[in-house]
């Protein structure tokens, strides 16, 4: 402040600048937050789509209108649910309104510059559009990261108080001469041949404790003024050779030089800003890229483009100006060597026309930003006040002092606005896609519902049916086997064995044959049961196969559900036979069965004991006693006679009993074959009953049949389950996608509102705010 308590001119500039710096920094931070939120959303929730198509076309299509109407309800419901996410005015109808506010010239992907996909590996954009969402979202992620890094650099840059002026232009245009003329010293070497091969920065010596030195820097990233190992101290006499040949491959040279002029006329140190001037190699094919990159560095606040008045703009120059316009829409242009031009007006007119095409905003301010001079004439002498050179100097000071706000803040403002407008395009594109996705999912869910319901019903009834099939089969086999074998065992005696009776002396062989025949008969009947079970199992499996082919007929093969269709082959049938066939004996009891005396005679050991005392003959009769009526009758007589009083009567009774016994023996011998068969069959029945013959075979066949049919039932049920699960997964996927697309709609809706807020804030910093 001056003694009157008022701010002087420079202080006012500083205050305005610091106020605007803070505002721009806030907006940069808000932009960064927006990009981070989109990046996170892209990474974690929804692969952000790239606007490949012309948005105006997409917005106006009938389909989109229909889609919007259809999902309006859903969105409303969601907005109400998530009222925290709702922003005022972010309704579907406004999507169209929003799109109408899109920048007219940024409707297609080819015009995205900041968030453009790095498709350097792809030859055409068509290839990019054929990439899937995830690939594009990864590429976009890179773009978001780059943008975040760039915003961070812009924040640093806005906070930085120093300014750098890059002097570039065509070969031999007089860049070095201009810098020398500005410093009024021969600081840089000048040659008629192209000579500058390096970037040379001229910095005020005050930055180097007032020492004038030349630092040749091998690695600019590692350069540190306080670290002598990070540069070579260069003798001024070696500067020209070093600059021309650069045999030591230095990346950059820094010349610390004193500007002995007063602060009012000094370029390097005017008391408010620390300025450095950077001379660059003349533009040609080799250096164009490097210089373009250099000029984009955040520290470069001002670019002076030097044009040789005799050559006008070369192709490299045009390329450079076109690319510089991305951030620096104003370029300070010096048309040098104007002294060599005879028809000055014509040259001036032609060059201004070119500037109008190449950098329209520079052209608008051409009075201040375009200068036609002869630098050579003013290296050692001051220009007359009011001369072209002196006016150029004034404008440059004005540009670096007063307009440095523009050079520092306007690029940030331009960048934010460009970024927001690109984000807006992305937001609109993604809202449309999300709407489209929601609409399609709703249709898919609606169309798929009847099929799903039918499938569910079919699955339930068919699973029951398959269980019914196996239960019925097992029940049939169990009942049949039990009844059949029970009947066979109980009728064993009446079974007609085709064994011949060869008399009492062949009784043993006869009994053996009868036993074998009965065992064979039983075995045959067990086989019959097995055959029955086998046919039931086969028909059950066939029924399941039929059911499964009905199921398969409703399966959509394109879904590639991993079902295994059921089928019954010859192999299956032979496996059934094998599995049901009984290996080994049909009963353990028959395997160990042996013939005994009781198989040949009907014995009654009680009677044998009672009659034993009657003598050897009666004893021998008693041994062969049986339940036959003749023998019983004889024994009863024997019992009665022992109680009779007279000897004659007793003797008569004994004789008659003897006769009866003889008759009984005769009868017994006569019925021996029937006795053997009866006794054997009874003993076999008894043994079989003890061995649970019927139950064991019926349970064996039932469980074996169950085991054979069960895999088919399982497979059949699994196939149905898989179909249902597939359908449920599909529907769950749809619901998840719909949830995401609704979330995306709201996210991008919010994003658009946020972008619009921020855009109007950033726009509110008018260019006049940057000026005094
Ligand atoms: N007639 C005339 N010649 C000039 C003027 N300014 C520079 N020259 C000459 O142009 C030639 C090249 O000058 P420099 O300053 O080395 O040009 P430059 O653009 O730095 O060259 P490079 O860095 O090699 O691209 C020298 O011979 C200068 O004397 C001028 O205003 N008028």
Image: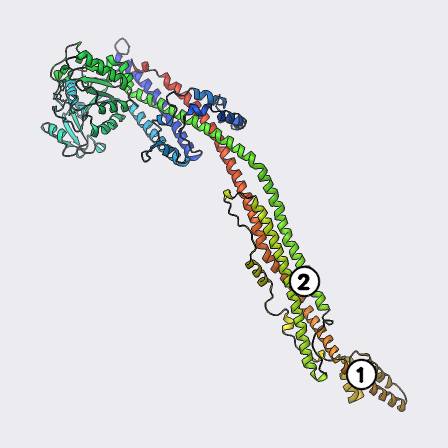
Q: Which mark is residue 677?
A: none
Query: Label 2 belongs to which residue?
Result: 481
269 on left or right of 505: left
Q: Residues within 10 Å of mark 1 (few under 14, many from 20)?
A: many
Query: What is the quadrant of residue 261 in the picture?
Result: top left
Q: Secondary structure at mark 1?
A: helix
Compare residues 97 and 528 and report the one nearer the observer. Answer: 528
Q: Position of residue 225 (x, y in %)?
A: 19, 30
The residue that appears at 11% across and 23% down in the rendered structure is 192
Task: Tell me the quadrant of ligand 1.
Answer: top left
The residue that appears at 71% across and 62% down in the rendered structure is 483
- Real-space Cα distance between discs 2 and 1? 43 Å
Above or below residue 460? Residue 66 is: above
Q: Residues within 10 Å of mark 2 (few under 14, many from 20)?
A: many
654 on left or right of 51: right
Q: Residue furthest bottom?
A: 648
């Amino acid at each position: 402040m001056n003694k009157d308590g008022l701010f002087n001119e420079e202080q006012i500039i500083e205050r305005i600048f610091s106020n605007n710096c803070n505002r721009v920094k806030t907006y940069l931070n808000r932009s960064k937050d927006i990009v981070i939120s989109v990046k996170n959303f892209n990474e974690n929730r929804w692969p952000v789509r790239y606007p490949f198509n012309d948005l105006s076309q997409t917005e106006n299509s009938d389909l989109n209108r229909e889609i919007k109407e259809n999902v309006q309800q859903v969105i409303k419901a969601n907005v109400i649910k998530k009222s925290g996410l709702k922003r005022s005015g972010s309704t579907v109808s406004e999507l169209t309104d929003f799109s109408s506010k899109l920048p007219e010239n940024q409707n297609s992907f080819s015009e995205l510059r900041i968030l453009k996909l790095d498709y350097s590996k792809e030859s055409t954009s068509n290839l990019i559009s054929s990439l899937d969402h995830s690939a594009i979202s990864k590429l976009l992620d890179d773009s978001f990261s780059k943008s975040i890094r760039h915003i961070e650099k812009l924040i640093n840059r806005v906070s930085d108080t120093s300014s750098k002026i890059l002097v570039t232009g065509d070969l031999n245009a007089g860049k070095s001469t201009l810098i020398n003329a500005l410093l009024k010293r021969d600081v840089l070497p000048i040659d008629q041949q192209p000579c500058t091969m390096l970037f040379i920065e001229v910095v005020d010596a005050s930055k180097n404790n007032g020492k004038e030195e030349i630092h040749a820097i091998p690695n600019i990233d590692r350069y540190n003024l306080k670290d002598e190992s990070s540069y070579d101290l260069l003798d001024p006499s070696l500067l020209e050779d070093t600059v021309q040949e650069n045999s030591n491959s230095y990346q950059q040279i820094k010349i610390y030089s004193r500007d002995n002029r007063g602060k009012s006329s000094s370029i390097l140190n005017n008391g408010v800003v620390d300025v450095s001037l950077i001379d660059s190699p003349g533009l040609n094919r080799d250096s164009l890229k490097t210089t373009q990159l250099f000029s984009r560095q955040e520290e470069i606040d001002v670019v002076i483009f030097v044009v040789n008045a005799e050559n006008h703009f070369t192709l490299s120059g045009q390329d450079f100006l076109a690319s510089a316009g991305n951030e620096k829409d104003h370029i300070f242009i010096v048309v040098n060597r104007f002294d060599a031009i005879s028809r000055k007006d014509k040259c001036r007119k032609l060059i201004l026309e070119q500037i109008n095409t190449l950098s329209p905003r520079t052209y608008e301010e051409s009075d201040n930003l375009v200068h036609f001079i002869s630098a050579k004439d003013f290296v050692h002498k001051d220009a007359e006040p009011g001369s072209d050179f002196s006016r150029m100097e004034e404008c440059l000071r004005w540009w670096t002092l007063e307009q440095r706000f523009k050079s520092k803040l306007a690029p940030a403002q331009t960048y934010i606005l460009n970024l927001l407008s690109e984000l807006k395009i992305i937001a609109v594109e993604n809202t449309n896609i999300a709407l489209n996705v929601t609409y399609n999912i709703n249709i898919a869910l609606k169309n798929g519902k009847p099929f799903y319901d039918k499938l569910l019903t079919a699955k339930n009834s068919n699973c029951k049916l398959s269980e019914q099939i196996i239960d019925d089969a097992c029940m049939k086999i169990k009942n049949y086997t039990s009844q059949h074998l029970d009947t066979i065992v109980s009728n064993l005696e009446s079974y007609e064995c085709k064994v011949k009776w060869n008399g009492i002396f062949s009784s043993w062989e006869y009994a053996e044959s009868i036993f074998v025949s009965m065992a064979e008969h039983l075995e045959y009947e067990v086989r019959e049961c097995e055959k029955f079970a086998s046919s039931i199992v086969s028909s059950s499996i066939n029924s399941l196969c039929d059911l499964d082919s009905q199921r398969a007929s409703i399966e959509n093969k394109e879904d590639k559900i991993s079902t295994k269709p059921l089928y019954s082959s010859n192999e299956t049938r032979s496996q059934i036979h094998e599995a049901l066939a009984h290996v080994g004996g049909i009963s353990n009891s028959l395997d160990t069965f042996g013939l005994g005396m009781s198989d040949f005679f009907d014995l009654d050991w009680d009677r044998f004991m009672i009659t034993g005392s009657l003598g050897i003959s009666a004893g021998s009769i008693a041994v062969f006693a049986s339940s036959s009526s003749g023998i019983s009758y004889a024994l009863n007589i024997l019992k009665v006679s022992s109680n009779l009083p007279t000897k004659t009567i007793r003797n008569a009774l004994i004789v008659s009993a003897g006769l009866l016994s003889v008759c009984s023996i005769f009868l017994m011998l006569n019925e021996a074959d029937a006795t053997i068969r009866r006794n054997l069959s009874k003993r076999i029945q008894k043994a079989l009953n003890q061995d649970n013959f019927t139950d064991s075979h019926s349970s064996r066949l039932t469980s074996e049949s169950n085991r054979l049919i069960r895999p088919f039932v399982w497979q059949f049920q699994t196939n149905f389950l898989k179909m249902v699960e597939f359908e449920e997964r599909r529907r769950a996927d749809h619901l998840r996608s719909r949830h995401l697309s609704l979330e995306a709609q709201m996210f991008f809706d919010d994003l658009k509102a946020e972008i619009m807020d921020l855009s109007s804030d950033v726009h509110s910093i008018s260019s006049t705010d940057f000026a005094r």
